[in-house]
Image (tube, rainbow, N blue to C red):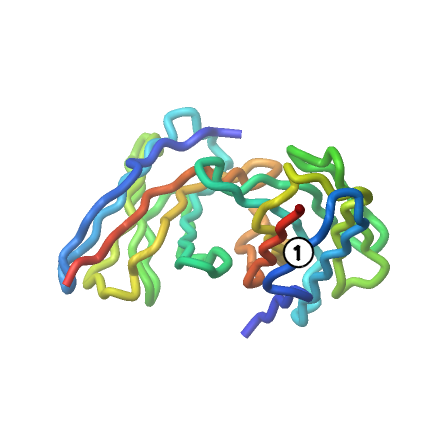
Amino acid sequence: DAKTTQPTSMDCAEGRAANLPCNHSTISGNEYVYWYRQIHSQGPQYIIHGLKNNETNEMASLIITEDRKSSTLILPHATLRDTAVYYCIVNGQNFVFGPGTRLSVLP
Amino acid sequence: DVKVTQSSRYLVKRTGEKVFLECVQDMDHENMFWYRQDPGLGLRLIYFSYDVKMKEKGDIPEGYSVSREKKERFSLILESASTNQTSMYLCASSPVGAGRETQYFGPGTRLLVL
């Protein structure tokens, strides 16, 4: 399974866009990129996933580079409730959740 | 909404005790998973199941077993609890599909083994 690299932590001002990067340089052609988040004391929550094309849903947008070696999760208008740990995952046979990025949305 | 429920939010057990963690999902999902989560280590897969009575080892199965007698229920068993099994345990389920789509997680069980 491909490994992912994310920054340990990021801050974002409330109301601004939060851009969370992820590197997955060893991703193979049939592997999807998934994003989950985990708010304190809760189970992880699915956000979005993609293969090659950019994706958007009601929660976020996912931008995948053309070579698929990296991606960015965009929360367009971050709120205090978006404070969480965000996990970028490349699927293979099993999901592997790394340490993720701790996003703090500041008032 | 998919609901994944776990039998306890908090559990305290003694070393050597047999511990059962129960997970139930209400969306008729084929796949079910057990993870543990520890600070600095992220989530690690213990066991998963693709069907009733079927189980597969994940990355860290030692010290654990599982049971899937019914489609909606997936149990994690610690035969003889040890202090290094103190952790947050998370259950998840997902439907069959390309890329195994999304996983839906329960709220977690915080287990403390004394």
Q: What residue is rendered at 67% in x and 67% in y?
A: B25
In this picture, residue A94 sits left or right of residue B56: left
Up-down: is A45 above or below B79?
below
Give the x, y percent position of residue A28.
47, 29
> Which residue position holds label 1?
B12
Please state, as top left, top right, bottom left or bottom right, where the N terminus of chain B lies in the image: bottom right
Up-down: is A1 above or below B7?
above
Q: Residue furthest top?
A: A26
Q: What residue is rendered at 68% in x and 37% in y?
A: B58
Q: Nearer the viewer, residue B28 or A103?
A: A103
Up-down: is A58 above or below B112?
below
In this picture, residue B109 sits left or right of residue B30: left
Q: Nearer the viewer, residue B18 or B40?
A: B18
Q: What residue is rendered at 21% in x and 53% in y?
A: A18
> Could you tell me which chain the residue with mark 1 belongs to?
B
Give the x, y percent position of residue B2.
58, 70
Give the x, y percent position of residue A100.
38, 41
Amino acid type shown at disc 1: Val
Q: Nearer the viewer, residue A40 or A34?
A: A40
The quarter holding residue A38 reads bottom left
Tag 1 secondary structure: strand
